[in-house]
Image (tube, coloured by chain):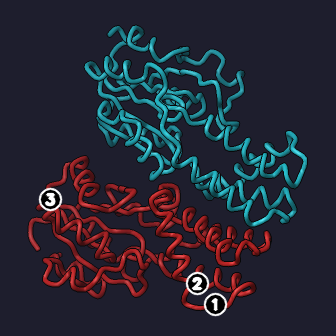
Chain colours: A red, B cyan
């Protein structure tokens, strides 16, 4: 992998733990609803259906997710859920926003090495306020020359980020855990991408295997393999 | 006003109508709560207290405001509010997100003149997804060389915006309706600012008159006075 001058990292589930916080919250949400209805697979599907329907209006992030939880809870309980339980659901959202930022293993060590050789960036999507808070609390900000928080990760937004930062496509590498958001749009632009899968993936980010067969990107099991691959 | 090369505009209530949408929603919110409790001044104060308390976690924007409305409604009705009414409150938030973007009078004409003489920017705070949608729907994007959506407007964030866009403080003019967000931090940086008051101001943005007495900024009643003042 030659000529790379800038490496951009996705943040959630690439630099720090994120989806397990949502997974854990969904479990607590089901516990609350379990007092009203029988818990089965439909419940999680129902919440995801509400989330998906609201995405166009709310975008990504915890606040929209919390509103979708409240909306699902009303629908699933036929509006019988008690106000105290609605309050508990909002509280779940607040706990997510205050959750400690747990940096993934080896991330700091790898950034320590890479910062001497490359311009490092964060490109993350989601809620501006929440993402900025997480970046600040991660303790990793000193490694990054630039931080870009975008509302959606598609070829257009990546092209705009590269343009406004004066980065050549051929000198750019994106590293992330989501094939849909961190890999496919980058390949479409003609830049390089490395996929580091995370064990927990939001349904919205899941890509069918047939879509990615033979595509020119590298999959890596651990971020600690990155310096070797880049020859530093 | 000499040496100005870049003019940045605040968006909400400077380029288009915003606070009246919140004011209108607060009225509808009170109508819903009126079925449970007597409507008086305390109610609006209570909602603002919840909003202020949540600001640290939610940041600015409609989704946080909607969650604060639900929370206030639960507290004010002692958790007796019906699920159907909680759903109506969430619906109010969705209607805000879909509200048409009404560009203020003379804005397009003024931008038409200014774009030939200055680099034009938008600097707005709030929710990334919502602000981007509003900018796109405003039809004004073609006038602006740069758009910066920030999580908070303070001297630090303005300094960072100027730095990353290579703008000299002495060549920068900010135009906006909020003394607190668009004027005071700009004066602190040593740049120039023009205040164009809007008739409706969120309590959070209101500044005591004693704080602004004698400060070096210009107040203008209409945006249409801007080209003359700038000599174009």
Residue A151 position (above or below residue B22): below
- Which residue bears the numbered disc 1? A39
At mark 2, the secondary structure is helix
- Which residue bears the numbered disc 2? A43
Foreground of the two, A204 or B149: A204
Dots 2 and 1: beta carbons under 8 Å? Answer: yes
Category of crowding for the residue at label 1, using alpha-carbon neighbours closer than 10 angstroms: few (below 14), some (14–19), many (at least 20): few
| The image quarter in which residue A210 lies | bottom left
Residue A18 is at least partly visible in this image: yes
Which dot, 3 or 1, sits closer to the camera? 1
Residue B1 position (above or below residue A124): above
Q: Earlier in the sequence, mark 3 or mark 1?
A: 1
Tag shown at residue A169: 3
| The image quarter in which residue A42 lies | bottom right
* Residue B48 screen position, x and y as percent: 74, 46
Residue B26 position (above or below residue A162): above
Foreground of the two, B97 or B15: B97
* Residue B89 screen position, x and y as percent: 69, 55
Judged left or right of residue A78, residue B116 is left
Tell me the quarter of the image containing the C terminus of chain A.
Answer: bottom left
Residue B50 position (above or below residue B23): below
* Residue A108 screen position, x and y as percent: 38, 74
Judged left or right of residue B187, residue B46 is right
Distance from Cα at disc 3 to Cα at disc 2? 43 Å
Labels 3 and 1 in the same subunit: yes
Query: What residue is at 28 percent from the left and 88 percent from the top?
Result: A221
Tell me the quarter of the image containing the N terminus of chain A.
Answer: bottom left
Parent chain of label 3: A
Dots 3 and 2: beta carbons under 8 Å? Answer: no
Query: What residue is at 28 percent from the left and 76 percent from the top?
Result: A179
Parent chain of label 1: A
Distance from Cα at disc 3 to Cα at disc 1? 48 Å
């Amino acid at each position: 992998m030659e000529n790379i001058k800038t490496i951009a990292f996705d943040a959630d589930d690439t630099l720090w733990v994120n989806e397990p916080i949502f997974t854990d919250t969904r479990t607590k949400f089901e516990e609350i609803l379990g007092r009203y209805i029988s818990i089965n697979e439909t419940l999680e599907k129902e919440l995801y259906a509400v989330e998906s329907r609201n995405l166009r209006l709310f975008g990504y992030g915890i606040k929209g997710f919390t509103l979708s939880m409240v909306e699902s809870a009303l629908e699933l309980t036929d509006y019988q859920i008690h106000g105290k339980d609605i309050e508990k659901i909002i509280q779940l959202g607040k706990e997510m926003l205050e959750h400690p930022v747990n940096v993934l293993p080896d991330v700091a060590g790898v950034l320590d090495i890479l910062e001497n050789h490359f311009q490092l960036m964060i490109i993350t999507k989601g809620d501006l306020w929440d993402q900025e808070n997480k970046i600040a609390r991660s303790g990793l900000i000193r490694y990054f020359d630039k931080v870009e928080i975008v509302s959606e990760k598609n070829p257009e937004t990546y092209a705009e980020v590269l343009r406004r930062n004066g980065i050549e496509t051929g000198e750019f590498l994106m590293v992330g855990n989501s094939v849909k958001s961190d890999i496919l749009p980058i390949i479409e632009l003609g830049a390089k991408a490395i996929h580091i899968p995370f064990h927990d993936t939001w349904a919205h980010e899941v890509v069918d295997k047939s879509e990615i067969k033979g595509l020119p990107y590298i999959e890596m099991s651990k971020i600690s393999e990155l310096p070797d691959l880049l020859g530093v």
